[in-house]
Amino acid sequence: MMRALYTASTGMYAQQLNVDTIAHNMSNVNTIGFKKQRVEFQDLLYQTIKRPAANEDINQPVGMQVGLGVKPAAITTLFSQGNLQATDNPLDVAIVGSGFFKVEVPGRDEPLYTRNGAFKLDAEGNLVTSDGYKVVGVEAIEQGAYDIVIEKNGRVTYMLPDSDEPIEAGQIELAKFTNPAGLQKIGSSLFAPTANSGEPEDWDPEEDNTIYLEAGYLEMSNVQIVEEMVNLITAQRAYEINSKVIQSSDEMLQTASNLRR
């Protein structure tokens, strides 16, 4: 059989995975704290038909190698900063920099991590995510509290009707990773550390000024619609071209099979 049939089929599969990834990016264009993904490809093995020769009698500097197609090598998550959107909600918090919020998830011994800062107060006054997972570092806020303030260093304070001084509820804990792209995606905008991401490093606002919080803002998805549309068109055309190669190879085989002596 012709190599082109199998080679083009690897290209169609690779572009199908590429379109799947683009579709995932575009479907999460309005997801708070979402980080887009990118498919990376590698060429497959090469079949050597003729090796280059260089000796006293002959000098052939170029040989003959035929490639056998392409394979998806990785799907990388890009943790570039998303745009900040003002909400005027004091419980909405955006991270500027490379940190992650720590949240406690029932059934897990270790906290999970997220960039989604759309926090709420539950019935007990705990600062929680939309799924009800408690934010690490903040104690329960007393009933009747008002003027809740989240400072740039994560410190949370509030006022009570019978108090003239703000009451401190703790400090939102953030963590950093050596390789954020190595984090495992859990879903619901949550990440879990792995051996590839490295151990979480606690953020110290007094020593690290590259990270700070912005209350009243949310970090939106870093997906760029125009860029994804261009990538989608490119992937679609690449898929079509590979299908044309299969069609052409089939026509060549049909011609060969119809030969008569």
Image (cartoon, rainbow, N blue to C red):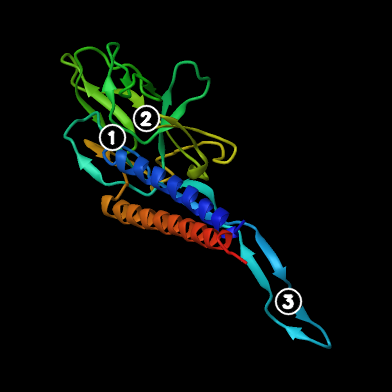
Mark 2 highlights which residue? 172
Q: CA distance from mark 3 to mark 2?
A: 63 Å
Mark 1 highlights which residue? 93
Please tell me whether mark 2 or mark 1 is closer to you in this view: 1
Residue at image x 57%, y 62%? 256
Label 2 SS: loop
Where residue 170 appears, as percent x and y from the top left, is 35, 25
**In the image, what residue type sits under mark 1?**
Val
| Tag 2 near tag 1, CB within 8 Å | yes
Vertical placement of residue 99 versus 261, above or below: above
Where residue 107 appears, as percent x and y from the top left, is 49, 16
The quarter holding residue 99 reads: top left
**Crowding near the residue tagged with mark 2, few <14, some 14–19, many ≥20 C-alpha atoms within 10 Å:** many
Where residue 114 appears, as percent x and y from the top left, is 39, 33
Mark 3 highlights which residue? 52
**In the image, what residue type sits under mark 3?**
Pro
